[in-house]
Amino acid sequence: MYFKRQLEVQFIESEHVELLFKQRYHQLSSACEDHLNWQILKPLDGDDSHYFQSIRIPSTDEQKTFDELTLALTKVLIDSLNEKRLNKLIAKDKREEIKGSILRLQVALESCGCRDAESHISFLRQLQNLRSSSVAHRKSKNYRKVAAELGVEDQSLRQIFSRILSEALAFLDYLLLVVRNHSLNI
């Protein structure tokens, strides 16, 4: 790969999950524009754009870096869900009882007949729990529970974040498929 990329100056598809994540995020944005005329993940404005730029596999196992990356990924994938537009995919009588962007996404996908979202919704909830128990609040018993579910005791923080980012990439791939298949019709 090095030879083709550096010496022959050929384009080679990256295998780095952080690069694939960013590539897929931009592809999803383009697909949303082309197929929906609205963004399922609202673009981050100038004050928050650094969160997207900072997403990467950490080079160390420092807790501070892991927490910052967890926060960044949560901002990009969960806090950016376009709840206003997702609401339009949900029956009016159900909208009031839905609390939280993850549940709103789940109900919207179900309302549109989208299948196979369970693992992605579960991933988003786990990511949200990780942020809530580590970054947003003091670490407590809940953090240890979430950390145990992620295998923090058995793996390095770099390995865990790499796995989290791979799941985030799979989530973006799922959304891209849903958007391109015109499954989110109002």
Image (tube, rainbow, N blue to C red):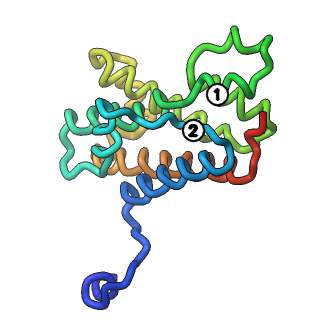
Q: Is residue 119 above or below residue 22?
A: above
At a point 38% along the width and 26% down the height, the residue shown is 131
At a point 22% along the width and 38% down the height, the residue shown is 65
Q: Furthest residue to the bottom?
A: 8
Q: Is residue 113 above or below residue 82?
A: below
Specify the quadrant that holds the N terminus.
bottom left
Q: Which mark is residue 85?
A: 1
Amino acid type, label 1? Arg
Q: Residues within 10 Å of mark 1 (few under 14, many from 20)?
A: some
Which residue was labeled with disc 2? 39
Q: Is residue 99 above or below residue 135?
A: above
Where does residue 142 sit, x and y in percent of width and height? Answer: 39, 19
The reply, left or right, for residue 102 in relation to residue 183 is left
Q: Look at the numbered discs 1 and 2 and tell me whether their residues touch, using CB distance below 8 Å.
A: yes
Amino acid type, label 2? Gln
Q: Quadrant of residue 66?
A: top left
At a point 50% along the width and 47% down the height, the residue shown is 167
Q: Which mark is residue 132?
A: none
Residue in front for this viewpoint, 13 or 143: 13
Q: Earlier in the sequence, mark 1 or mark 2?
A: 2
Residue in front for this viewpoint, 111 or 82: 82
At a point 74% along the width and 52% down the height, the residue shown is 181
- How many numbered marks have been drawn onto this rendered protein structure? 2
Circle 2: element type: loop
Where does residue 21 sit, x and y in percent of width and height? Answer: 44, 53
Circle 1: element type: helix
